Image (cartoon, rainbow, N blue to C red):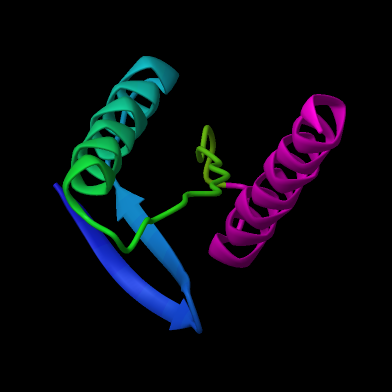
Amino acid sequence: FEKCFRIGGDEFAVIGRYKTLAQIEKALRKFKNHIKEYNSKSNLKLDLAYGYARRENTDISTYELFNKADKEMYRFKRRGKALIKMNA
């Protein structure tokens, strides 16, 4: 259903055929739960920052779709850093 590709360093892209945002969010919850389970058993903790984009029409190129997801990931990272500062 999905294909995962390493695109550099510690960055990966997952391409899937999700028809709805709900399906994307369900897959993300499942992935986050796997990471949480792994972290509960390991001294080496994993962290996740992600962004996603969905092709709703054929007018958007794969490149544009990837850039949209990348921008969402950085927005997610900035929100996370703001939360850490607020809790410090």
Q: Residue at x 37, y 15 (%)?
A: 22
> Magenta includes 71?
yes
**Main secondary structure of the magenta stretch:** helix
Residue sticking out furthest to the top: 22
> Magenta includes 15?
no
Residue sticking out furthest to the bottom: 8
Q: Quadrant of residue 67?
A: bottom right
**Closer-to-camera residue (56/53):** 53
Percent position of residue 80, x then y: 71, 38
- Quadrant including the C terminus: top right
Percent position of residue 47, x then y: 46, 52
Residue 40 higher or lower than 8, as above or below: above
Residue 26 higher or lower than 61, as above or below: above
Q: Quadrant of residue 27?
A: top left
Q: Residue at x 76, y 36 (%)?
A: 84
Q: Residue at x 14, y 47 (%)?
A: 1
Q: Residue at x 35, y 57 (%)?
A: 14
Residue 72 higher or lower than 8, as above or below: above
Percent position of residue 44, x then y: 32, 63
Which region shows up in magenta?
59-88
